[in-house]
Image (cartoon, grey):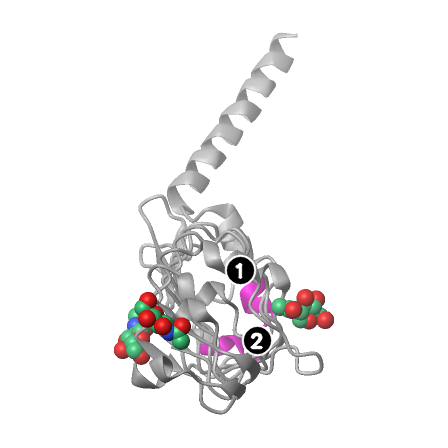
Amino acid sequence: MQLYKSAMGKKFASVLLFSLVTVIFCTTDPGDLYVLMQFRDGLENPDLLEWPENGGDPCGPPSWSHVFCDEESRVTQNEAQGVGLKGTLPQNLNKLSMLKNIGLQRNQLSGKLPSFDGLSNLQYAYLDYNIFDSIPTDFFDGLDDLQVLALDHNNFNATSGWSFPKALQNSAQLTNLSCMNCNLIGSLPDFLGSMPSLTNLKLSGNSLSGEIPRTFNGSAVQMLWLNGNQFTLLYNWIVAQ
Ligand SMILES: *[C@@H]1O[C@H](CO)[C@@H](O)[C@H](O)[C@H]1NC(C)=O
Ligand SMILES: *[C@@H]1O[C@H](CO)[C@@H](O)[C@H](O)[C@H]1NC(C)=O
Ligand SMILES: *[C@@H]1O[C@H](CO)[C@@H](O)[C@H](O)[C@H]1NC(C)=O
């Protein structure tokens, strides 16, 4: 009995020691680490990221290239613009719930753009100049802090075309929205003219049609790029802006 107890004690002590070592040497949030590993695994040329082969601790110190974290070792930024990345993004990317800034523009990322649903800390999202072929409807849900969203030059939903879901109007801090050459169809949504912070709206090179909604008369929008669409009527007040 005595023997059994001390064996248990030893086992307990070594488990404790092991957890302490893990806590000390791997600070990155395990959930965030898992998403980053899936991000790497979805790439055809992950070597371009220059991340260590055997995994480890993206938040460091030192943190891995293209990764930035907060004091709690949660990933806040993923910045890899123009690196030449080929492949797809993991569909659970929105599990990086502390993400503030994502810059993956000017790569060759393809397939389905994952939903950004619930990324309530996200402020800057640059996904332009890739070759994504679809964008999910719930992409825009719960983006409470979003300030800049760039989706230009992607081949989203080419067969059917698509339009901005209403959920986008809840991004009250959005200042820059650009989606040039990204297969938008239908009329220009009314709500875009009423968004309180939206000043730069670039939607050239789509198949938008109909009239410019009246909400744009006196709206916050200062820079409005709509050339290369199929509008029937541009009001004088638009031209004058
Ligand atoms: C784009 O296409 C996908 C797949 O057909 C569909 O599920 C999704 O709702 C479409 N996106 C939008 C914004 O309509
Ligand atoms: C917002 O758009 C303006 C006008 O195109 C541009 O000058 C500015 O750099 C953009 N801001 C960001 C943070 O991308
Ligand atoms: C735009 O708003 C101004 C001021 O409210 C108004 O006088 C004008 O008629 C409006 N223009 C259109 C085309 O609705």
- Mark 2 lies on a secondary structure that is loop
Q: Which mark is residue 140?
A: 1
Work out whether residue 217 or residue 177 is closer to the camera in this orientation and state it. Answer: 217
Amino acid type, residue under disc 1 in the picture: Phe
- Above or below, 66 against 122 in this view is below
**Nearer the observer, disc 2 or disc 1?**
2
Q: Which residues are magenta?
A: 37-48
Q: Does 210 sit left or right of 219 as displayed?
A: right
Specify the farthest residue to the right.
Answer: 159
Question: What residue is drawn where x is 50% and y is 66%?
Answer: 190
* Quarter of image, res 5: top right
Viewer-nearest residue: 191 or 20: 191
Main SS of residues in magenta: helix
Q: Please tell me whether residue 33 belongs to the stretch shown in magenta.
A: no
Can residue 91 be seen here? The reply is no
Q: CA distance from mark 2 to mark 1?
A: 18 Å
Q: Which residue is mark 2?
A: 187
Question: What amino acid type is highlighted by mark number 2?
Answer: Ser
x and y, in percent, of residue 214 in the image: 44, 70
Q: Is residue 76 above or below residue 221?
A: above
Q: Quadrant of the C terminus?
A: bottom left
